[in-house]
Image (cartoon, grey):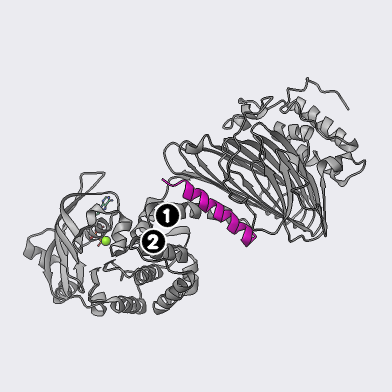
Amino acid sequence: MNTAAKPAPTLISADARPVSGAWAHDARADAAHRLAEMGLPTRRDEYWKWTRPDSLITATPASAEVFDYDGEPPVFHQVDRLKIVFVDGVFDAEASDDLSGEGLEIERLSDAAAKDIHWAKDLYGVLETRGQSPVVRPLAAHNTAMATDGVVIRATGRISRPVSVFYRHDDANSDAVLHHVIRVEAGAKLTLLENGAAAARFSKVVEVDVADGGEFHHVRAQGRDHQRQAITHMFARLGAQSVFKSFTMTVNGKLTRNECVIEFLGDDAIAHAAGAALGDGADGEFHHDDTVFITHDAVACESRQVFKKVLKNGAKGVFQGKILVKQKAQKTDGYQKSQSLLLDDDASFQAKPELEIYADDVICSHGSTSGAIDEEAMFYLRSRGIPAHIATDLLVLAFLADAIEEIEDDAISAEITDRLDAWLARHRG
Amino acid sequence: MLKINNLHVKLEEEDKRILKGVDLEVPAGSVHAIMGPNGSGKSTLSYVLSGRDGYEVTEGSATLEGNDLLDMDPEERAAAGLFLAFQYPVEIPGVGNMTFLRTAVNAQRKARGEDEMSAADFLKFIRAKAKELKIDADMLKRPVNVGFSGGEKKRNEILQMAMLEPKMCILDETDSGLDVDAMKLVSEGVNALRDTGRSFLVITHYQRLLDHIKPDVVHIMADGRIVKSGGPELALEVENNGYAGILAEMEIDA
Ligand SMILES: Nc1ncnc2c1ncn2[C@@H]1O[C@H](COP(=O)(O)OP(=O)(O)OP(=O)(O)O)[C@@H](O)[C@H]1O
Ligand SMILES: [Mg+2]
């Protein structure tokens, strides 16, 4: 391997000690090299125009007070699931379930990385690398280079019980870097749940490879800690007739940037990425960024982006979404919707929806709007005796509805709706 | 029941006077109709009574059973027993009709200090009312008024009225857009609610509706005022001769 052309920039979490076995060592070195080539993001980068990367790349994170849940059970507690727990980025064997199941192989990344041969070798850092063009994502390369742990999951059957990763945040100064690798084999099915604030600063990458006819469902609840900062990446590669569905609920958080990079390589596949974010600046700073890049490089695939934000009291929302349709991707059906509901004049939303299309027989559209509560609807509801604050909540949930509808499982969807309801009830007025 | 005294209303945003001294009293148990040319202020009156934003009352009063309506929020007026069937019912994507109605029924019960209705009781109640109005289960599940035909929207207004059991019902052109059968259905729905403790103010352009819902008094509104009141025969006169005669007699330009 070549030595880096420029010296490696000061990395975040300089004291993190990445686990490294034989194959993983090379992947990490390669990532460090790529990172050195691309450099860390700066405010001058077009891709970081609206979200300041500064706090994500300092040597030590700003501390984040641990949120007092006051006995409130974690999201998904009612869902029968296989639990994996990380506390401030450190695997908690005690709190985790047995990492096994029929049709399911689960290992800690640190264990997998210590082996000489492992299937994850073909994915770790590989999908991330694919996702580095045409736009670079330095913090994803950084994650590949520096991740301390994570899980690798291989589904060979249709697994009905979701695998749930809970990220507990206990330490006000923690800096967690986790990296998961998932392979859904042909015809297999897996549901991944994620929740919890994770750390004062959290960097996470998920690489997911869905083989032909496979199905991957992902529902994430980004937690309540007001001061936490997170940068997450999801890199998905989709085979023919596969299904990928991802939904993220975000409430609170000083800074969250969720990047989702999806690549269609097989025909007739479906990918839906959705998000519902709620921010109230009265709780402290709130900045939420959804950055999505979907590449159609196969025939007759369907992609959907449905991102909704509800913002008030100075909360900020950002959406950068792109659909790239390559020349051979005929019969592409791509749709992108990003909307925000600004509950007052202080909230702000910036959006950059993009389509780049090289095939001629495609249906692609995008729509980005930001607006206030519909006064007509509000009056109609109130005229039926519904008090203003309840009417507002109804209209907010209605606004979020088409994002929530992307969650296929009713029980999980109900959990998410309950949390959104509760958040709204706490943030009235 | 409803007492309106010398009500003057202008638009909040511009210097446009719409109601210019409306006087109207609807006693408990009676049905009054308002007819009048387009733009005479009928809908404005119904909106001002139910508390819509954008209007400024410059003079006069409106009370429901002695309580000052103009001082209340829209939801308080509803809880006090006022109901407006909208001329143009509002579509609310994402809010299920059923959720909407259950929230409304329970909010009103709560405001009146009553217990909330259980989910099961509510379901029974709404199914029975919907059946009477020939509203199918599918319409109850759909988002409020979204994709409803004109007639379906109007029937949905009457369903809401039947569920909320208000004391003072204002129907703003509920007959427009209804086919002959739907008109009969809606009228039956209204007539079923007629009661000594309940009053109706029916805004319409056509005598036809008043054949089904027999009014006690008919008012003619023109240029922001009630210019003439009389018995049901007044509606017939309008139907046969239009407003020209009446307005000329009152020396009002339409
Ligand atoms: N928000 C508004 N902005 C501007 N003009 C308004 C507004 N609301 C009402 N008006 C005007 O006030 C007048 C009365 O309107 P209104 O809707 O009350 O009439 P109406 O009697 O109900 O008519 P129709 O029989 O056509 O339903 C009209 O000239 C209308 O254009
Ligand atoms: Mg009108």
Check residue A390 in the rendering and tell me which mark sits there, or answer none: 1
Q: Is residue A252 left or right of residue A362?
A: left
Q: Image quadrant for the C terminus of chain B? A: bottom left
The picture places residue B131, in percent across and down from the top left corner, at 43, 78
Q: Secondary structure at mark 1?
A: helix
Q: Which residue is mark 2?
A: B107
Q: Image quadrant for the N terminus of chain B? A: bottom left
Q: Which residue lies most toward the right here?
A: A116
The picture places residue A167, in percent across and down from the top left corner, at 69, 43
| Residue A409 counted in the magenta span | yes
The picture places residue B182, in percent across and down from the top left corner, at 36, 76
Question: Which residues make up the magenta segment?
Answer: A408-429
Amino acid of disc 2: Ala
**Quadrant of the displayed image that contains ligand 1:** bottom left
Q: Secondary structure at mark 2?
A: helix
- Chain letter for the residue marked with disc 2 in the picture: B
Mark 1: few, some, or many residues within 10 Å (few <14, many ≥20)?
Answer: some
Could you tell me if residue A73 is visible in this image? yes
| Residue A118 counted in the magenta span | no
The picture places residue A146, in percent across and down from the top left corner, at 77, 32
Quadrant of the rendered image containing residue A55: top right
Check residue A272 in the rendering and tell me which mark sits there, or answer none: none
Amino acid of disc 1: Ile
